[in-house]
Amino acid sequence: MSNTRKAEPGSPPRQERYASAYERGLLGNLLAKRIEHLTPEQRAPLIFLQWLSWRPAAFTEARKAIGSDELDRLCLDPGFLPADLLQAVTDYRAAWIASRPPVVQTTIGKRIAAAIAFAQDTKSVCYLEGMPRIGKSFAAKEICERSAGLVRYVQTPASNDEFSWVRAFALALGVSASLKMKVVEIRARVEETLQAGGIGIVLDEAHYCFDSYLRSTSLPMRINWLNCALVNYGVPLILISTDQFQKAIARVEKSTSWTSAQLTGRITYKERLPDKLPMSDLISVARAIFPEGDVRAWRALGAYADMSKNHLSAISALAIRARWLAGRQGRAEATPDDLRHALRESISPVALRGVAYSPPAARGHVASAPRHRRGIHADRRTENFY
C-alpha cells in the first residue's frame, strides 16, 4: 500500500502498510504531514478527528452528526480543505467538548489544568510534583480527554527498554506500533507527529524516565530524547511525578557525568502540589464516587480519606467494598449501611498515618484509651457514622 504522498493523483488517500497491524484509526504521523503548514485554528479540528478515529463508534457518530463521509480525506489529503466542512468539524468539536459529563474538579485538578494551559500557550516544559494518591493521574487524564486530542496522556513505562518507551508515545498519538516494527521506525513516526506541532504531552510517573540500573557511563537516554526531540521543537510537555523525580536526578548526577541543568534549565514552570486536599474536595469526591450514600456517609468517607495515607484511593476502595457486600446479599445497589459495614471491617493500620488502630470488636474499650491512641474510631467526623 502507498502512503498519502505517494498516492496517484485522483486516487483516495491511503495509509501506510503498518496501519492494520494495530487497532484501526487514522495515523498521527500521516496527519502530521497534512497539518504542518496549517494555522492552529485549522489544526485543532483535524487533530480532533484523528484522535476520535481511534474510537470507531465515536468516529461513526461524528460522521453522522457532521453529515460527511469525507472526514478521512480531510485528515489525509493535503489538497482537500473545504471551508464549510472544516467549520462543521470545528462546531462539532466544540459541541463534543461541551457535552462531556461534569466531573469534580479538586484543588489538584485546577492546578494541573492551569499548568497544562500554560505549557500549551507558551510551548514550554512544566514540572508538577505531588504526593501519591491525591488525584494527579485522574485529573491529568480528564484534562487530556477534554482537550479533544490537543494534549495526549502518556504513562511512563517502568521498564528500562527503549521499545516500551517509544511505544507508549506511539499508542497515545495513534501511530503504528506493531510488535514487529523496529524501535527506530516507531520513534521516527512519533517524532514526526509531535514536531509537526499542535499536540502536547502529559508525561505521568515521570520519575521512570531514569533507568533503575545505572553505571558510571550511563546517561538518562529518555530525558535526553525528551530534550532533543520534543523540547527543542517547542512541543508542550508537562512532567508529573512524586518526589522520586528529584531523588532520581540526584542519584544519576552522583553516579554519572550527567548534569541536571540539561533538564532543569529547560523547565519554565515548577510547582509543588498540596500534600492534601481540603475536606470540601474530599466530600465532593466521595459524593461522586459513592452517589448511593447520604450526607453522613460522604462526610465519613471524606474524614477517612483525610486520615489515610491512600487519600482518594481510600474512598474508592471503600465504595468498591460496599458494593461488593451489597452484591453478596443479592442487591444491585449499595446503601450507607453497606458502607458503614465496610468502614468497620476494612480499616487497616497500613492506611493510617501512624495512628494506632482499634479493631471493631474492641470499640467498647476505646473511650478509656488516650485520645491520640484511639485510632480512627475516636475521630468525631467518623465515629457518629458507626
Image (cartoon, helix red, strand yellow):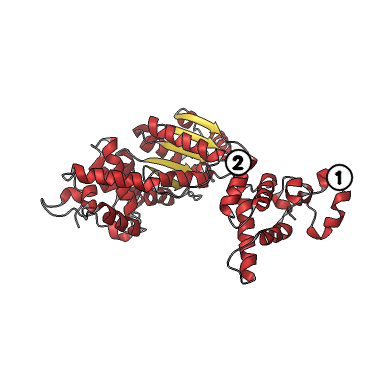
Disc 1: which residue: 370
Which quadrant is the N terminus positioned in? Answer: bottom left
> Do residues under tags 1 and 2 come within 8 Å of each other at their CB atoms?
no
Disc 2: which residue: 131
Amino acid at the residue labelled 2: Met
Q: Residue at x 45, y 43 (%)?
A: 143
Element assignment for label 1: loop
Q: Does residue 217 appear anywhere in the picture?
A: no
Q: Is residue 67 above or below residue 108?
A: below
Amino acid at the residue labelled 1: Pro
Q: Nearer the viewer, mark 1 or mark 2?
A: 1
Q: Residue at x 24, y 43 (%)?
A: 87
Residue furthest toward the front? 295
Few, some or many residues within 10 Å of mark 2 (<14, 14–19, 20+): some
Which percent across, then down, holds residue 156? 47, 47
Classify residue 288 as left or right of residue 183: right
Which percent across, then down, holds residue 63? 27, 55
Few, some or many residues within 10 Å of mark 1 (<14, 14–19, 20+): few
Which percent across, then down, holds residue 386? 75, 56
Residue 273, quarter of picture? top right
Classify residue 325 as left or right of residue 365: left
